[in-house]
Image: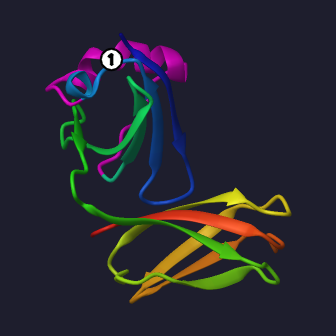
Amino acid sequence: MAILNISRDYGSNPSIVRMVTDDSYATMTAAGYLTAQQANIEALNVGAFEWRANDVILASYTGDATTLFTVSADFTALADFENRSFGALTAVWAGGGTSNAFAAAGLAATDIVVAGITASQNSVAVTKVVPTTDVLTVTFSADPGTGTRLYWIALRG
C-alpha cells in the first residue's frame, strides 16, 4: 500500500496538502508513516517534498473516506484533526462583485478557514478569506457570477 498522489496548494498559509492513498486510517496514523513513505512521496513529487509546520493535509484513503490531518512536529507522522474543526458549510451567492460577507454562525476571528468554489458562472479563484465573529468575508479573483457556491471549513485556532 502507498501514497498514490500528493500535491500542495501554494499561495496561502496554512497550506493544504492533498493526498490520495490506498492505505488504511490505522496505517496512515501510525508512527513513522511519512518516513516510511518518503521515497514514494519524492518519486510522486519528482524531488523533495517540503513539509511545513502548519500544513493541513486533506487525505482520501481506503474506503473512499476523507479526513483532515496535521503533520507531526518532526514531519514523520500524520495526526487526525480530531474535533478541532467546528464546521463545514456551503454558502450560495448571486455574484455581482469580487467580495462577499457570508453569515457564519460560531466563527471566530482567530479561526483558520479553508475555502473553495464548488460552482460559479465565471472562472475565478478564492484569493482571500477573512474570518471575523460570525462572518466569513471571501474575496474572489473576479466576479464569480450568479449561482456561486462556496464550501468552507473552519478550524479552531
Give the magenta-colored segment's residue range.
29-53
Image quadrant where residue 111 sits: bottom left
Residue 152, x across and y down, in percent: 51, 64
Q: Residue at x 26, y 15 (%)?
A: 36
Residue 17, x across and y down, in percent: 45, 41
Q: Residue at x 85, y 63 (%)?
A: 121
Left or right of 44 in this view: 29: left
For this orientation, the residue located farthest to the left is: 31
Left or right of 69 in this view: 64: right
Q: Residue at x 79, y 69 (%)?
A: 144
Image quadrant where residue 27 sits: top left
Above or below, 135 against 124 in this view is below
**Which of 77 and 149 lies nearest the eye of the viewer?**
149
Image quadrant where residue 153 sits: bottom left
**Which of 41 and 99 lies nearest the eye of the viewer?**
99
Hey, what amino acid is under mark 1? Gln
Q: Is residue 108 in the magenta section?
A: no
- Residue occupied by mark 1: 37
Q: Is residue 52 in the magenta section?
A: yes
**Which of 55 and 120 lies nearest the eye of the viewer?**
120
